[in-house]
Amino acid sequence: MTRLILASASPRRLALLAQIGIAPDEVIAADIDETPLSKETPRNLALRLARQKAEAVKAENAIILAADTVVAVGRRVLPKAETEQETRQCLRLLSGRSHRVYTGVAVLRTAGFQRANTAGRQDAGGPMLRTRLVETRVAFKVLSPAEIETYIASNEWHGKAGGYAAQGLAGRYVTSIIGSYSSVIGLPLYETANLIESART
């Protein structure tokens, strides 16, 4: 069987895959520069980073799954918050308005892939890269200064795109989600499952 490699150290993505019965054979965190390019749109950024993460993992006879989630207000990309001040700025910007969450997914089938043909013999399949972009609209309630500080004190925002985790305490601030909920927390499951299945055939 061809190995499935998850090019991410995110425990959220690993848990989401487990939810639909997919267990990667290996987890290899892809280390790339995630700085947006000049005039790069949020949707293009998410797709580019997902693709580059998949390509950064060097393995033969493997299917490599990578993803990147970008939170944006208009064309403004919010950071993956690393400080309390960054988180405070993100939450103030998100308060009382809707924003978009873009998750790019890339599945790379590397050289050496073997697949069974209709006669039951093994054929060599060539390299293949397929990507999908999933866009979801999320709306927040108006956040009071006290709510923002309480959330910051939880520390669950650390490293999260836009400074929040919808699957955690921030879920109480979300008034609506239009689109894929699993995409908001890191991996659109329907699209991901289809990409993996297409890579295996």
Image (cartoon, grey):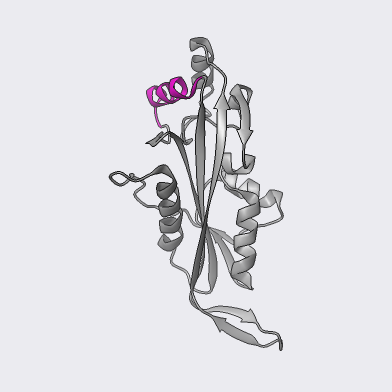
Position of 101 with respect to 82 (left or right) is right
Q: Is residue 83 magenta?
A: yes
Image coordinates for residue 47, horizontal then vertical, percent: 45, 52
Instruction: Let me know if residue 167 appears in the view.
Output: no
Which quadrant holds residue 39? top left
**Relative depth, front residue between 192 and 6:** 192
Please say if 88 is above or below 183. Answer: above
* Residue 54 visible within the image: yes
Residues in magenta, as a range: 82-95
> Looking at the image, how many numbered discs can be counted on the residues?
0
| Identity of the residue drawn at 43% across and 66% down | 58
Task: Please say if 163 is above or below 27.
Answer: above
Q: Is residue 88 magenta?
A: yes
Residue at the location (62% across, 79% down)? Answer: 115
Q: Which sits in the foreground, 143 or 76?
A: 76
Horizontal arrangement in the rendering, residue 90 relative to residue 198 (left or right): left
Q: Is residue 54 above or below residue 162?
A: below
- Of the 4 image quadrants, the one containing the N terminus is bottom right
Q: Position of residue 117 (x, y in %)?
A: 66, 84
The percent position of residue 143, horizontal first and vertical second, equals 53, 16
State the image coordinates of residue 121 (x, y, percent, origin top left): 67, 88
Looking at the image, which is closer to me, 179 or 59?
A: 179
Rendered-image quadrant of the C terminus: bottom right
- Magenta: main secondary structure equals helix
